[in-house]
Image (cartoon, rainbow, N blue to C red):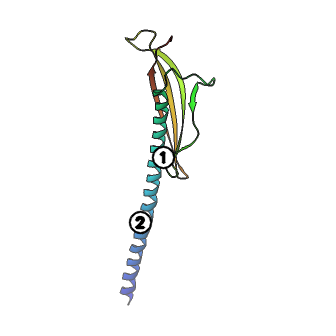
Amino acid sequence: MVSTLLVVLVLSVIALGAAWLASTEEKTSFSAGVHARSVFSADAGSEAGINFLRVADTPPALNSADGVVAQTQDITLAGSQTFSFQCTFVGQSPRPGWGIEYPDYDYEVLSTGHAATDGTSLVKVLASRMFKTGY
């Protein structure tokens, strides 16, 4: 009878350990999924900022003294996923081989992605776009 109780005790400890491991794995996989969704949301925000620069006919004008040319609030993607971006003018530099009337306008796109209640990621992209000046 004592050996039976010891075997039952050992099997109970093994079952308890397996249940604890399963619940830990579930929490870890959920957190990894939230993180991946927040990174993808931030990437979508950086792509939206780059697209803002891509479709501009002229260099975006400065809206404020700190160089911000575009800024969005939270834009919903799907479910709890949202993003926002801020596009900031960094500077202007000549493009080699094009002459002084074709400078590169350099911008920094900072995007924040959110997923669920606690998933947040930041993506920072530096983008250059050549515009012809003087027309």
Residue 30 in picture, x, y percent from top left: 45, 57
Label 1 environment density (alpha carbons within 10 Å; few <14, some 14–19, many ≥20): many
Q: Quadrant of residue 74?
A: top right
Q: Mark 2 — residue?
A: 22
Is 11 situated left or right of 115 in this image?
Answer: left
Q: Residue furthest bottom?
A: 1
Say which residue appears at 48% left-offset and 41% top-offset: 42
* Residue 57 drawn at (x, y percent): 49, 22
The kind of residue tagged 2 is Ala
Q: Position of residue 123 (x, y in %)?
A: 48, 37
Does residue 108 appear to the left or right of 22 in the view shown?
right
What secondary structure is found at the residue carrying circle 1? helix
Q: Residue furthest right?
A: 65
Q: Nearer the viewer, residue 12 or 42?
A: 42
Question: Between residues 29 and 47, which one lies in front from this camera angle?
Answer: 47
**Circle 2 sits in a helix, a strand or a loop, which is it?**
helix
Residue at left 46%, top 31%?
51
Task: Give the vertical position of 115 relative to 50 (above or below).
Answer: below
How many marks the image carries: the answer is: 2
Using a 10 Å C-alpha cutoff, classify the residue at mark 2 as few (fewer than 14 neighbours), some (14 to 19) or many (20 or more).
Answer: few
Circle nearer the viewer, 1 or 2: 1
Residue 38, numbered circle: 1
Viewer-proximal residue among 80 and 122: 80
The span from disc 1 to disc 2 (Cα, nearest Å) is: 25 Å
Q: Mark 1 vs mark 2: which is more N-terminal?
A: 2
